[in-house]
Image (spheres, grey):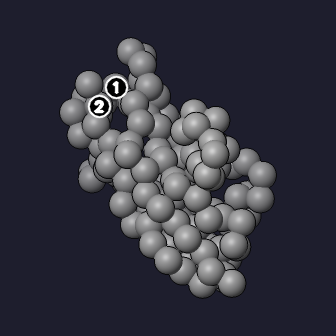
Amino acid sequence: QVQLVESGGGLVQAGGSLRLSCAASGSTKSIKAVAWYRQTPGMQREQGEQVGAISSSGGTDYNGNARGRFIISWDNAKNTVYLQMNSLQVSDTAVYFCRGLTEHGDYWGQGTQVTVSS
């Protein structure tokens, strides 16, 4: 079992930055990759847009307009994955979730709200 807890969300002005955290506990060594998703109103969580992902070996991939603005990193000592979001836009407003992918299944956190004001 893996437990994931996101934090770091909040209200920020357009052009600003936020860093989200995804803290893992439990069988953390079983996590092969962590992906960040975002969900806007009306979407189911699993239908949310994948922002990007990082593998346990450190490889990263980004989708859409997250590329070039967002950076995902993994601190093994703290069992935490970060999503550094820069040059935030109003359209980045969403609930952000992390998803841990393991051999035995996927685990989701509870989400953290990010609101970007104009």
Q: Which numbered tag is attached to residue 64?
A: none
Q: Which residue is pictured at 52% across the width and 55% down the height?
A: 95
Q: Is residue 2 above or below residue 66?
A: above
Q: Nearer the viewer, residue 60 or 96?
A: 96
Name the quadrant of the C terminus.
bottom right
Q: Nearer the viewer, residue 107 or 111?
A: 111
Taking 117 as reference, is 21 left or right?
left
Taking 9 as reference, is 37 left or right?
right
Q: Is residue 116 above or below residue 118?
A: above
**Which comes sooner in the sequence, label 1 or label 2?**
2
Dividing the picture into quarters, in which one does residue 92 lie?
A: bottom right
Looking at the picture, which amino acid does disc 1 mark? Ser
The residue carrying mark 2 is 2
**Residue 85 x/y as whole percent:** 58, 67
Name the quadrant of the N terminus.
top left
Q: Which numbered tag is attached to residue 30?
A: 1
Dividing the picture into quarters, in which one does residue 10 lie?
A: bottom left
Question: In the rendered image, is residue 106 in sight?
Answer: yes
Looking at the picture, which amino acid does disc 2 mark? Val
In 3D space, how far apart are the residues under numbered discs 1 and 2 (Cα atoms)? 8 Å
1 and 2 marks in contact (CB < 8 Å): yes
